[in-house]
């Protein structure tokens, strides 16, 4: 603890690295400011592992990036709840705004992975991994699990909105074309559909970057693996599951029916006309 004299008064403040001999390098917090109180910042910083309990020089970096990711998933989940409510009230414009926030926030999780990929070496990660708790597997993330569950509610609300509007998914796709004559209400629902896909694309990008990080840290990249390697020989998560499980999840979207619609549109627009086939 150190003394702090400022507008909040004379009080003791906490430091994240009290063993740091250089006072200018100590990270001080819990000053009793309105900013810290309103954001619950003291509680958030208190969740960080004390410096003298860190298992590795990259341990704090590793923890912070994972905490940032989990906070982002909480924000996404909150927006998905708001999105479901907007669809239930028949407000596609607000629903689209919530989807923009979902996609942008999910993009932050991708950046967290890129930061880790760019600066965490495989040797450093594997050394640290030996000391991490055995159940500390990313597959146990509450954030991604709750987002998946919420996505089911979102899709049900979207399908109900489409049915209530008396249109089909094909109508919404048609409304995204450059020469559409669709009614404004249909075009608004089409924007929601587009927003759902953008959000799902961002989540899929997170999964793809994540599996790439796993290959980088654990090995087992499928094309680079030995030809005769079976699933039992592949790298495993901290819970003992083969990374092939993670690879399957990496291509699983939140809204599969939306992607099936993409396939249907492609097939319809790429089909050979009967007269051309006869020729």
Image: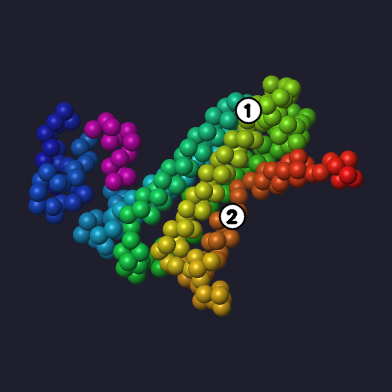
84 relative to 233 in the view: left or right: right
Q: Residue furthest bottom?
A: 228
The picture quadrant where one finds residue 124 is bottom left
Q: Nearer the viewer, residue 7 or 183?
A: 183
The x and y percentages for residue 27 are 19, 45
Q: Image height check: is 79 above or below 61? A: above
82 relative to 30 in the view: left or right: right
Q: Image height check: is 105 above or below 65? A: above
Front label number (2 vs 1):
2
Q: In the rendered structure, which disc, 2 or 1, sits on the residue that comes first in sequence?
A: 1
The x and y percentages for residue 81 are 55, 38
Give the image's coloring scheme. rainbow
The tag on residue 92 is 1
- Residue beneath disc 2: 251
The x and y percentages for residue 148 are 57, 49
Q: Is residue 63 visible?
A: no
Q: Image height check: is 94 above or below 279? A: above
The majority secondary structure of the magenta stretch comes to helix
Name the residue located 20 percent from the left edge and 37 percent from the top edge. Answer: 31
Q: Is residue 145 visible?
A: yes
The x and y percentages for residue 125 are 34, 63
Residue 56 in the magenta stretch? The answer is: no
Q: Dot 2: within a 10 Å radius of its alpha carbon, few (fewer than 14), some, or many (20 or more) residues?
A: few
Residues in magenta, as a range: 33-45
The picture quadrant where one finds residue 33 is top left
């Amino acid at each position: 603890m150190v003394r702090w004299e400022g507008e909040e008064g004379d009080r003791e403040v906490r430091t994240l690295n009290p063993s740091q001999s250089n006072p200018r390098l100590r990270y001080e917090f819990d000053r009793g400011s309105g900013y810290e109180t309103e954001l619950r910042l003291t509680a958030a910083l208190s969740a960080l592992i004390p410096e003298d309990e860190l298992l590795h020089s990259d341990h704090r970096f590793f923890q912070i990036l994972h905490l940032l990711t989990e906070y982002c998933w909480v924000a996404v989940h909150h927006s998905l709840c708001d999105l479901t409510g907007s669809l239930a009230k028949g407000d596609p414009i607000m629903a689209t705004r919530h989807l923009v926030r979902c996609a942008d926030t999910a993009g932050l999780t991708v950046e967290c992975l890129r930061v880790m990929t760019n600066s965490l070496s495989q040797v450093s990660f594997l050394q640290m991994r030996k000391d991490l708790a055995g159940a500390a597997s990313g597959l146990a993330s509450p954030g991604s699990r709750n987002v998946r569950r919420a996505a089911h509610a979102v899709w049900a609300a979207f399908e109900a909105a489409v049915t209530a509007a008396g249109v089909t998914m094909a109508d919404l796709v048609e409304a995204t074309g450059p020469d559409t004559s669709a009614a404004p209400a249909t075009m608004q629902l089409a924007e929601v559909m587009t927003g759902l896909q953008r959000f799902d694309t961002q989540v899929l990008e997170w999964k793809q970057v994540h599996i790439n990080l796993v290959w980088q840290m654990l090995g087992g990249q499928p094309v680079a693996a030995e030809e005769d390697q079976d699933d039992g020989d592949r790298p495993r998560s901290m819970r003992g599951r083969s990374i092939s499980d993670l690879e399957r999840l990496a291509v699983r979207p939140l809204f599969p029916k939306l992607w099936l619609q993409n396939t249907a549109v492609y097939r319809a627009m790429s089909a050979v006309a009967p007269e051309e086939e006869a020729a």
